[in-house]
């Protein structure tokens, strides 16, 4: 039998706090989603002035990163490069930049999704949060 690491409420709180602080430092209004390795939501926060739709998009970006074990930007790049068949994958609705897997000891424990700023800012905030567990 294998042992599986999972994100506890302590780690989820740390991921949210880092993302919130990074967004505040940049004066950005965003939604922050944290999901487990199966893409199931563990936490969601919409900062002041973030558009309501960003909450949905953040969850979907995180879900895509967790289920596919890679940054959601990879799918946006593939689609922009002509692999439009990815648009037909039924469960992947967050194939935009801003979803980053949380990886510890080579295992994906979940993901962070950010929505509301530029694609680059969304991704860098998500990456800063994901890197929290590496410290």
Image (tube, rainbow, N blue to C red):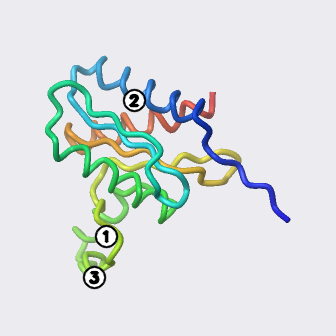
Q: Who comes first in sequence, dot 3 or dot 1?
A: 1
- Secondary structure state at the residue bearing disc 1: helix
Q: Who comes first in sequence, dot 2 or dot 3?
A: 2
Q: Label 3: which residue?
A: 85
Q: Label 1: which residue?
A: 78
- Secondary structure state at the residue bearing disc 3: helix
Farthest-out residue, top: 25
Whether pointer 1 and pointer 2 mark residues with C-beta atoms closer than 8 Å, the reply is no
Badge 3, how many Cα within 10 Å: few under 14, some, many 20+?
Answer: few
Rendered residue at 81%/61% (across/down): 2
Question: To which quarter of the image does residue 31 belong?
Answer: top left
Q: Position of residue 79 (x, y in %)?
A: 25, 71
Rendered residue at 25%/51% (across/down): 57
Q: CA distance from mark 2 to mark 3?
A: 32 Å
Q: CA distance from mark 3 to mark 1?
A: 9 Å
Residue 76 in the image: above or below residue 36: below
Q: Label 2: which residue?
A: 19
Badge 2, how many Cα within 10 Å: few under 14, some, many 20+?
Answer: many
Q: Position of residue 8 (x, y in %)?
A: 62, 38
Question: To which quarter of the image does residue 95 belong?
Answer: bottom left
* Quarter of the rendering occupied by the C terminus: top right
Number of marks in the image?
3
Residue 117 horizontal side relative to residue 19, left or right: left
Tag in front: 3 or 1: 3
Whether pointer 2 and pointer 3 mark residues with C-beta atoms closer than 8 Å, the reply is no
Q: CA distance from mark 1 to mark 2?
A: 26 Å
């Amino acid at each position: 039998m294998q042992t599986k690491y999972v994100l506890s409420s302590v780690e989820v709180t740390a991921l949210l706090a880092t993302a919130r602080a990074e967004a505040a430092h940049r004066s950005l209004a965003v939604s922050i989603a944290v999901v487990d390795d199966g893409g199931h939501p563990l936490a969601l926060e919409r900062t002041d002035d973030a558009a309501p739709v960003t909450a949905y998009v953040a969850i979907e970006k995180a879900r895509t990163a967790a289920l596919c074990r890679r940054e959601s930007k990879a799918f946006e790049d593939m689609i922009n490069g002509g692999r439009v068949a990815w648009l037909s994958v039924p469960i992947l609705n967050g194939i935009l930049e801003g979803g980053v897997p949380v990886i510890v000891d080579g295992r994906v424990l979940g993901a962070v999704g950010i929505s509301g700023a530029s694609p680059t800012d969304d991704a860098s905030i998500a990456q800063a949060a994901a890197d929290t567990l590496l410290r």
